[in-house]
Image (tube, rainbow, N blue to C red):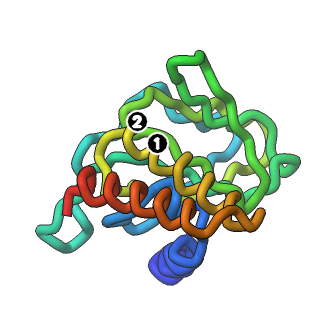
């Protein structure tokens, strides 16, 4: 059942342009599922930098970590995902179906659940672009190209901007 659900999650991600643009996935670790009941938590940690694929010699560099929230926030108390960034602590308790993606090198934790059950899926991504700052620049550039396309901006300028995007992606990709 977990494998089927994981495949469903991966199929949805493959069709999500925002996920593709932000993450630039090369390899995605099969989603895992967890349930936290009252009193359960996961202390502050950093995800391992390399994971082995189950039943395979294949390895994945964990550039990004992802948490897919599966329970409605009102179904449980506590259980926030807390990520430490350069801007301080960021706490998240998102709607069922929402995904939070963050650098695997960021310290993070799951606060204790005090009522109900927190259900989530977690997985890791090896991006085409290893560097967080480069990936962020490409994401902003891609989103800008998309917005300009929607507003009917000058076609020649869009082609030139798109060429820069793909030139950077080619230079920064690790495939």
Q: Check disc 1 and report the residue beneath it.
A: 137
Q: Position of residue 165 (x, y in %)?
A: 42, 56
Quadrant in which the C terminus is drawn = bottom left
Residue 107 vs residue 164, the one in the foreground: 164
Q: Is residue 91 above or below residue 25?
A: above
Residue 151 position, x and y percent, is: 77, 63
Helix, strand or loop at mark 2: helix
- Left or right: 175 with respect to 75? left
- The mark tally for this picture is 2
Front residue (pair 108, 1): 108
Q: Nearer the viewer, residue 158 or 29?
A: 158
Looking at the picture, how far across and down is residue 174, in whole percent? 21, 57
24 relative position to 93: left or right: left
The reply to whether dot 1 and dot 2 touch (C-beta < 8 Å) is yes
- Within 10 angstroms of label 1, few (less than 14), some, or many (20 or more) residues? some
Cα distance in 3D space between marks 1 and 2: 6 Å
Residue 31 at least partly seen? yes
Q: Is residue 1 above or below residue 48?
A: below
Marks 1, 2: nearer the viewer: 1
Q: Which mark is residue 121?
A: none
Residue 133's disc is: 2
The local secondary structure at tag 1 comes to helix
């Amino acid at each position: 059942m977990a494998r089927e659900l994981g495949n469903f999650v991966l199929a949805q991600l493959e069709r999500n342009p925002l996920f593709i643009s932000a993450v630039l996935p090369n390899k995605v670790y099969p989603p895992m599922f967890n349930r936290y009941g009252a009193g359960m938590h996961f202390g502050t940690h950093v995800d391992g930098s390399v994971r082995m694929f189950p039943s395979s010699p294949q390895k994945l560099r964990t550039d990004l970590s992802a948490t897919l929230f599966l329970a409605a926030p009102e179904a449980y108390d506590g259980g926030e995902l807390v990520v430490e960034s350069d801007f301080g602590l960021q706490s998240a308790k998102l709607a069922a179906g929402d995904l939070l993606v963050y650098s695997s090198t960021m310290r993070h934790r799951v606060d204790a659940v005090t009522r109900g059950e927190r259900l989530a899926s977690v997985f890791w991504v090896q991006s085409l672009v290893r560097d967080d700052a480069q990936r962020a620049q490409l994401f902003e550039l891609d989103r800008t190209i998309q917005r300009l396309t929607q507003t009917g901006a000058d076609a020649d300028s869009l082609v030139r901007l798109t060429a820069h995007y793909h030139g950077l992606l080619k230079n920064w990709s690790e495939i």
